[in-house]
Structure formats: C-alpha cells, structure tokens
C-alpha cells in the first residue's frame, strides 16, 4: 500500500516537472523565414511521450492520469498573474495551444482503448 502511494506521488511530481518545464520552454521559437515554435513542439511531444509511455508500460490508465493531472495543475497554476504582474503563459497563439493542448492530449491518451490485451478468437477466426 505504501509503495502505491509513493508511486502515485512520484507520478504527479513527474507530471508537474513536465508541466513546469513545458510552460517555461513553450515560448521558444526559431525563425527560418517563418517563426517555428520549437519550444511548443518539443513541450507537447515530451508531454505526449510521457503519457503514452506510462500508458503502454502500465497495466491501467491510472499512471498516465496521475501524471497528466500533475502537469495540468502546474500549467493552470502558471497561467495566474504573479504579484509583480508577470505571467508565464501569455495570451498569444503559443500560450493558448500550450494551455489547451495538454488537456486534449491527456484526454485522448487516457481514454484510448487498451490495445495490449488480445481478444480471444471467435469461431476460430483470429
């Protein structure tokens, strides 16, 4: 029981770390003729990789859900204006995608059917 609680706390913390790093990095862009949001792309790919990896390695949806909750809570926390008036997620396209993207990714990954379990054959068909 204790190990499950520790695992749950570590999963939430891992998600929170991914959410915090993604929040800081999502505004990074490189201009090669047009601006390419490398920070946003990298942050969304890292978040997706974390959740898909947890979903594939775990035997349930709970590890991915806990990591997603940790990340989403941190992202929502960082949308708040600080005492000095600064925000980490500005009201621009990259900020809006970073705010909505992880929620949609988490919903898809957690709700995706379990494909690792093979169903038994029906009438000799596989």
Image (cartoon, grey):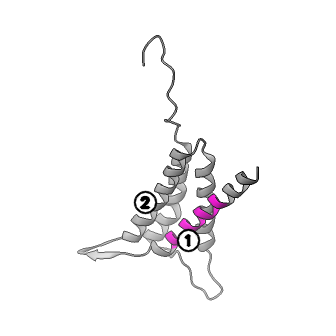
Q: Is residue 21 magenta?
A: yes
Task: Please identify the dominant SS of the magenta region.
Answer: helix
> In the rendered picture of this protein, how many numbered marks are placed on residues?
2
State whether residue 107 is above or below residue 12: above
State whether residue 84 is above or below residue 93: below
State whether residue 71 is above or below residue 84: above
Callout 2: few (<14), some (14-19), or many (20+) C-alpha neighbours within 10 Å?
some
Where is residue 21 drawn, in percent x and y?
A: 51, 71
Q: Which mark is residue 45?
A: 2
* Residue at image coords 63%, 48%: 62
State the residue lying farthest toward the top.
123
Query: 40 or 8, which lies in front?
Result: 8
Query: Which residue is the site of mark 1?
Result: 20
What is the CA distance from the residue labelled 1 to the residue labelled 2? 14 Å
Secondary structure of residue under mark 2: helix
State the residue lying farthest toward the right.
1
**Region rendered in magenta:** 10-23
Where is residue 8 drawn, in percent x and y?
A: 68, 55
Q: Is residue 63 magenta?
A: no
* Residue at image coords 54%, 53%: 106
* Residue at image coords 53%, 46%: 57
Where is residue 97 drawn, in percent x and y?
A: 46, 64
Q: Is residue 34 left or right of residue 93?
A: left
Quarter of the C terminus within the rendering? top left
State the residue lying farthest toward the left.
33
Q: Is residue 74 left or right of residue 51?
A: right
Query: 109 or 93, which lies in front?
Result: 109
* Residue at image coords 61%, 51%: 63
**Mark 1 vs 2, N-terminal side:** 1
């Amino acid at each position: 029981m204790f190990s499950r609680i520790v695992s749950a706390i570590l999963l939430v913390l891992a998600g929170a770390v991914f959410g915090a790093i993604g929040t800081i990095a999502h505004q990074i862009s490189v201009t090669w003729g047009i601006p390419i949001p490398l920070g946003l792309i990298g942050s969304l790919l890292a978040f997706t990789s974390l959740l898909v990896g947890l979903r594939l390695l775990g035997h349930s949806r709970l590890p991915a859900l806990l990591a997603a909750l940790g990340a989403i809570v941190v992202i929502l926390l960082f949308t708040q204006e600080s005492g000095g008036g600064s925000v980490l997620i500005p009201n621009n396209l990259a900020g809006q995608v970073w705010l909505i993207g992880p929620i949609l990714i988490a919903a898809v990954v957690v709700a995706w059917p379990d494909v690792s379990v093979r169903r038994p054959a029906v009438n000799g068909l596989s």
